Image (cartoon, rainbow, N blue to C red):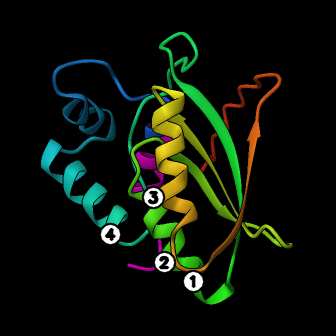
């Protein structure tokens, strides 16, 4: 699959901010889209396999739940960039993992339930082959940006 269909775009638009809280959210989405739950689930699997969708999840107030958030910048050897990014993506608290231009070329955020757990994960990431340096950037102020991409 290389192109998004109109159905895919409508489904992805709903997923970005209108997932119903109920026992069968995908059946509800299917109803809104004029189809059935199996079709929605099948398309989501295909969209994920094709790289259009990374994860479906909720946003929560991490501080109120006792989680600690850290922005991390890595200096990674270019040939190891993909492997390091994939390794980071396996951690449940890793989000917003992006390649960047410049000396520190891979940036991600990490949410963890404790400083000790964070330290353990960052030590594992620092030891990955190709990681040359790491900057741990604690937030002084929290900004919540709700980015949604309207697909047409």
* Mark 3 nearby-residue class (10 Å; few <14, some 14–19, many ≥20): some
Height in image: 129 above or below 4? Answer: below
Name the residue tied to disc 2: 83
Q: Which one is closest to the eye, mark 1 or mark 3?
A: 1
Region of the chain picked out in magenta, as a range: 1-14
Disc 4/disc 2 C-alpha distance (Å): 18 Å
Residue 126 in the image, given as x and y percentages of width and height: 58, 62
- The quarter in which the C terminus is drawn is bottom right
Quick one: SS at disc 1? helix
Residue 48 in the image, given as x and y percentages of width and height: 35, 62
The reply to whether the magenta stretch includes residue 106 is no
Disc 4/disc 3 C-alpha distance (Å): 15 Å
Nearer to me, 144 or 112: 112
Residue 93 in the image, given as x and y percentages of width and height: 46, 41
Horizontally, residue 127 falls left or right of residue 136, namely left
Name the residue tied to disc 4: 49
The reply to whether the magenta stretch includes residue 12 is yes
Height in image: 6 above or below 96? Answer: below
Task: Indicate which disc, 4 or 3, sits on the residue closer to the N terminus.
Answer: 4
Task: Indicate which disc, 4 or 1, sits on the residue closer to the N terminus.
Answer: 4
Q: Are marks 1 and 2 in contact (CB under 8 Å)?
A: yes
Name the residue tied to disc 1: 80
């Amino acid at each position: 699959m290389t192109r998004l269909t109109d159905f895919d775009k409508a489904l992805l638009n709903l997923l970005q901010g209108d997932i119903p809280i109920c026992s069968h959210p995908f059946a509800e989405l299917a109803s809104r889209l004029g189809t059935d739950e199996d079709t929605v689930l099948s398309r989501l699997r295909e969209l994920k396999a094709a790289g259009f969708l990374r994860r479906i999840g909720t946003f929560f107030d991490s501080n109120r739940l006792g989680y600690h958030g850290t922005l991390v910048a890595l200096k990674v050897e270019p040939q190891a960039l993909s492997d390091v990014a994939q390794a980071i993506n396996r951690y449940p608290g890793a989000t917003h993992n992006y390649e960047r231009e410049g000396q520190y070329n891979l940036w991600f955020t990490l949410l963890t339930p404790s400083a000790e757990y964070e330290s353990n994960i960052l030590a594992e990431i620092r030891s990955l082959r190709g990681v040359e340096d790491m900057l741990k950037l604690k937030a002084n102020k929290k900004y919540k940006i709700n980015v949604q991409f309207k697909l047409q």
